[in-house]
Amino acid sequence: MNAADWFGIITMPCDIANFCLVSIRLQTRSSRLSAKGLLASGPDKVALKIIKNIEKYREASKLEINVLEQLKRNDPEGKFLCVKMLDWFDYHGHMCLAFEKLGASVFDFLKDNNYIPYSLHHIRHIAYQLCYSVKFMHDLSLTHTDLKPENILFLSSDYSVSYNPSKRREERTIKDSTIRLIDFGSATFDFEHHSTIVSTRHYRAPEVILELGWAQPCDVWSIGSIVFELYTGFTLFQTHDNREHLAMMDTILGPFPSWMVKKTKKNKYFYHGNVEWDRNSSSGRYVRDNCRPLSDYKTSESEEHRKLFHLIGLMLNYDPHERITLKQALDHSFFDALTKQQRCHDTRPSHSISR
């Protein structure tokens, strides 16, 4: 398909008005096309997600539309921070989904800022909103299954710049850390077929890797991995191999529960209940040199940093049945320092979860 075919005027139906899309900038990503459209009716912009006219992709897009419509029906005001789908339409067989235009993803902002970690107060606000938004999905019997920094967008990309004399560099600081959750193409209802493997590799829960079945707790694991990345500026599990991934988990989080080792059909990764990996191989040396116990990644021993790592540890519990729920996470003491304006709700019990 020639990108030039996509330039022109397209009448786009929408629940707010009829308007014309007068320009589209394309960027190929896998089998999907992402685009931004400029509205002829004024300065407002929309983000347009275009799915190629290929049957399996069209069918997948219909599933995503169903999820988005369910979210909109249950949250017409958008208070649960899921991206708002304005409308969708079929253009010559290509499924086009129109969304509110948002800012950069938390990943792109991190990358453009030379992977300088977010400040603790920004991490707190982002993590809280993420827990709040995904809990809303979980309450609807939905699992997102593809939570990652690329799928968390700031409402606005505006930032300030300051000079860090100790590092001799300029650093960006996001002005407004309000977020929206995007990409519901892999979201799965409890009653639907569950694919064996879900989630982007770096944010994949152990029960998924070991093919033990999955549900909402796999999203919680992903959130724990994301929050760690916001804090350090790098991915916790930087790998593309199952054995190496499990070895990293073992090094950072300790040994796996015996029931998971016994139950998995992926027993080739274990020997006498422990992850089997060659510490002297190139992969083994990488794990040995780059992974350490989770608490050792703290950059400060202050109480707030300890609270954060306590929360991350609860989210990265191997056992999905014992992993903290997002309802519980929202009541964690790490979030006590949020301002009233930053809170999406204020129904905390009198005693917050803490260490």
Image (cartoon, helix red, strand yellow):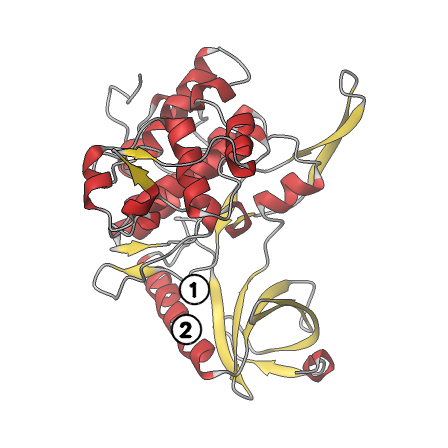
Q: Which residue is mark 2?
A: 60
Q: Is residue 129 left or right of residue 321?
A: right
Q: Nearer the viewer, residue 22 or 268?
A: 268
Q: Looking at the picture, how far across and down is residue 86, in whole percent? A: 49, 67
Position of the N terminus by quadrant = bottom right
Q: Is residue 194 left or right of residue 146?
A: left
Mark 2 neighbour density, 10 Å: few (under 14) some (14–19) many (20 or more): some
For the point 29% across and 36% down, which residue is it? 271
Which amino acid does the dot numbered 2 rest on?
Answer: Ala
Of the numbered discs in the image, which one, if any, rests on residue 350?
Answer: none
Tell me the element at label 1: loop
Closer to the chain start, of discs 1 and 2, is: 2
Q: Looking at the picture, how far across and down is residue 350, in whole percent? A: 24, 20
Q: Looking at the picture, how far across and down is residue 20, in whole percent? A: 64, 78
The reply to whether dot 1 and dot 2 touch (C-beta < 8 Å) is yes
Tell me the element at label 2: helix
Q: Looking at the picture, how far across and down is residue 13, in whole percent? A: 52, 79
Which amino acid does the dot numbered 1 rest on?
Answer: Gly
For the point 46% across and 49% down, which residue is it? 201
Q: Which residue is mark 1?
A: 185
